Structure formats: structure tokens, C-alpha cells
Amino acid sequence: MKKLSIRSYAYIGDAVYEVFARKKTLFITENPKRLHKATSSIVNAEFQTELLEFIQDFLVEEEKELARRARNLSVTTARRTNHTLHRLSTAFEALIGYLYLNNQDRLKDLYNYIEPLIDKKLLNSSLPSGQGTNLS
């Protein structure tokens, strides 16, 4: 496989993680609003940053270095967007993209590692307003 830029890994990682998230939420409900809410709860910069922090002890040095390099990319964001959050979520997406293209077994292991945190978030997001707990 040809080595790609960090941005390219983030680009494909964004799509790969979105598909993973949609597969996770697909069976929660058939209601489009609830489905969107559930998916959005795990596909956003804030939660992806939380996941990146959660997996630090799981990552090998090569993966940590890739995430560090991705975190340091310059990013363009909307005025109201937190640049630090966006950079960290880009690092998470780059890691997903890199593993998807270079080591799908490791990606599966990573998904298994983060699944309990994702399931907890989905459980909280699928409850009626006020019944979930805050993960932060």
C-alpha cells in the first residue's frame, strides 16, 4: 500500500468511522430523528476526542506517533468550532483511516476496545431527555 498523507488517512477515517457508527445505531430505532440523534452522539468532535483519550494506553508507539502528527495538522474550521477539539478528532479519524487501509485486524481490535464506551454513550443518547447520564 502506498503511504498516504495524514489528511488522506483522516479523510478516509472520517467515512469509515461514520459507517461503523451507522452500523452500531442501525438497530436502535427506525425513527429517523432518533437514529440521527444516536449516530450524532458518537460521530462528533467532542466524543471522538474522548475516544482518542480513552485509547491512549491501547495504542502502540507507531499509532501514537500518527495521532500526534495528525493532531498537529493545521485545520480550517467554522468560527464557532473549537480548533483543539477539531484537531483531536482529526487525529482519531486519521488513526481509523490508517488502520482501515493498513491493518484491519488491528482496527477490529480497536473497535472492540472502544465498543463499551460507545454502547454507554448510545444507551444514554437513546433514553428520553433527562434520563441519560452525562459521560464527562
Image (spheres, rainbow, N blue to C red):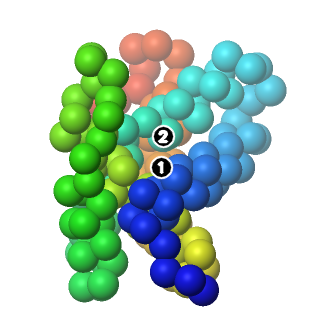
**Mark 1 residue type:** Ile
Q: Which residue is mark 2?
A: 42
Nearer to the camera, 117 or 53 = 53
Of the numbered discs 2 and 1, the one sitting upstream in the chain is: 2
**Mark 2 residue type:** Ile
- Counting from the top left corner in percent of width and height, residue 103 is at 55, 84
Q: Quadrant of residue 102?
A: bottom right
Nearer to the camera, 66 or 120 = 66
Q: Which residue is mark 1?
A: 118
Residue at image position (67%, 27%) is 35
Crowd class of label 2 (few under 14; some 14 to 19; many from 20; radius 10 Å): many
What is the count of numbered marks? 2
Mark 2 → mark 1, Cα distance in angstroms:
7 Å
The quarter of the picture where the C terminus appears is: top left
Residue at image position (49%, 39%) is 43
Left or right of residue 95, residue 57 in this image: left
CB contact under 8 Å: marks 2 and 1: yes
Name the residue furthest right: 30
**Is residue 13 visible to us here?**
no
Determine whether 28 is above or below 74 in the image.
above
Determine whether 83 is above or below 34 in the image.
below
Q: Secondary structure at mark 2?
A: helix
- Counting from the top left corner in percent of width and height, residue 120 is at 45, 45
Crowd class of label 1 (few under 14; some 14 to 19; many from 20; radius 10 Å): some
